[in-house]
Image (tube, rainbow, N blue to C red):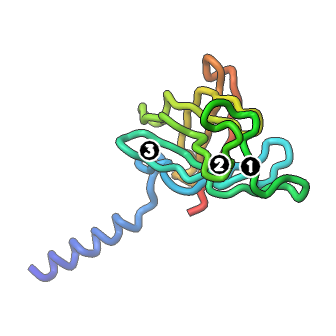
C-alpha cells in the first residue's frame, strides 16, 4: 500500500512538472510587446481570464528617452480620451474557440483606434500571436508577444 502511494506521488510530481502544451495553456499572464519599427520593448501587458473571456491591461511602458514616461492616450475616444496608458485596457472580449481566442478587440494607444482581434498561443505557451484587423483577419497586422513569467 505504501509503495502504491509512493508511485502515485512520483507520478503526480512528474505530471505537475511536465511542460504545458500551447493547447492546454492559457494566455493569462504577463507579456512583453515589441515595437514593430524599432524592435525595442514597448510595454508589459497583463492578460487575465474571467468567465472564459480575456482582458489585457498595460502594466508598464518602456518609453524612448525623448518620450513622456507617463503617456496618455491622447488620440483615444470616449472614456479613454487622455487616460493614462499605464492601466489602460487594450485587449477585451476574447473568447476561446478551438486553439484561438477570437471575437475581441484591441486598442492601439498610439493612434487611438480599436480593431477586431484574435490571439493564439505558440511555442508551448511562451509566445502569443496577437492579430488586430479591420473586417477580416487578412486585413490587419500581427505581433508576437513574449511571456514574462
Q: Looking at the image, is mark 3 or mark 2 nearer the viewer?
A: 2
Q: Is residue 143 shown above or below 149?
A: above
Q: How crowded is the residue under tag 3: few (<14 C-alpha within 10 Å), some, or many (20+)?
A: some
For label 2, the crowd category at 10 Å Cα-Cα, with few meaning under 14, some 14 to 19 and many 20 or more, is many
Q: Which mark is residue 125?
A: none
Give the spatial CA distance, label 3 vs label 2: 17 Å
Residue with the mark numbered 3 = 23
- Mark 1 vs mark 2: which is more N-terminal? 1
Nearest the eye: 2 or 36: 36
From the viewer's perspective, tell me whether residue 114 is left or right of residue 3.
Answer: right
Mark 1–mark 2 CB contact (< 8 Å): yes
At 45% from the left and 60% from the top, the residue drawn is 19
Residue at 85% x, 48% y is 38
Q: Is residue 142 left or right of residue 122?
A: right
Q: N-terminal of the two: label 3 or label 2? A: 3
Q: Mark number for residue 145?
A: 2
Quadrant in which residue 135 is drawn:
top right
Q: Is residue 9 above or below residue 23?
A: below
Residue 70 x/y as whole percent = 75, 55
Is 148 displayed left or right of 28 in the figure? right
Viewed as shown, does residue 50 lie left or right of 148? left
Residue farthest to the right, as pictured:
66
| Residue highlighted by disc 1 | 34
- Callout 2: SS: strand
Amino acid at each position: 500500500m505504501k509503495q502504491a502511494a509512493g508511485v502515485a506521488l512520483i507520478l503526480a510530481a512528474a505530471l505537475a512538472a511536465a511542460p504545458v502544451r500551447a493547447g492546454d495553456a492559457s494566455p493569462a499572464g504577463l507579456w512583453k510587446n515589441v515595437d514593430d519599427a524599432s524592435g525595442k520593448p514597448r510595454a508589459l501587458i497583463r492578460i487575465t481570464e474571467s468567465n472564459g473571456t480575456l482582458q489585457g491591461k498595460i502594466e508598464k511602458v518602456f518609453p524612448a528617452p525623448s518620450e513622456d514616461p507617463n503617456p496618455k492616450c491622447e488620440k483615444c475616444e470616449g472614456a479613454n480620451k487622455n487616460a493614462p496608458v499605464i492601466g489602460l485596457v487594450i485587449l477585451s472580449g476574447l473568447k476561446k474557440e478551438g486553439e484561438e481566442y477570437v471575437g475581441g478587440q484591441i486598442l492601439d494607444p498610439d493612434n487611438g483606434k480599436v480593431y477586431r482581434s484574435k490571439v493564439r498561443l505558440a511555442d508551448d505557451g511562451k509566445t502569443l500571436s496577437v492579430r488586430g484587423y479591420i473586417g477580416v483577419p487578412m486585413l490587419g497586422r500581427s505581433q508576437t508577444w513574449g511571456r514574462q513569467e
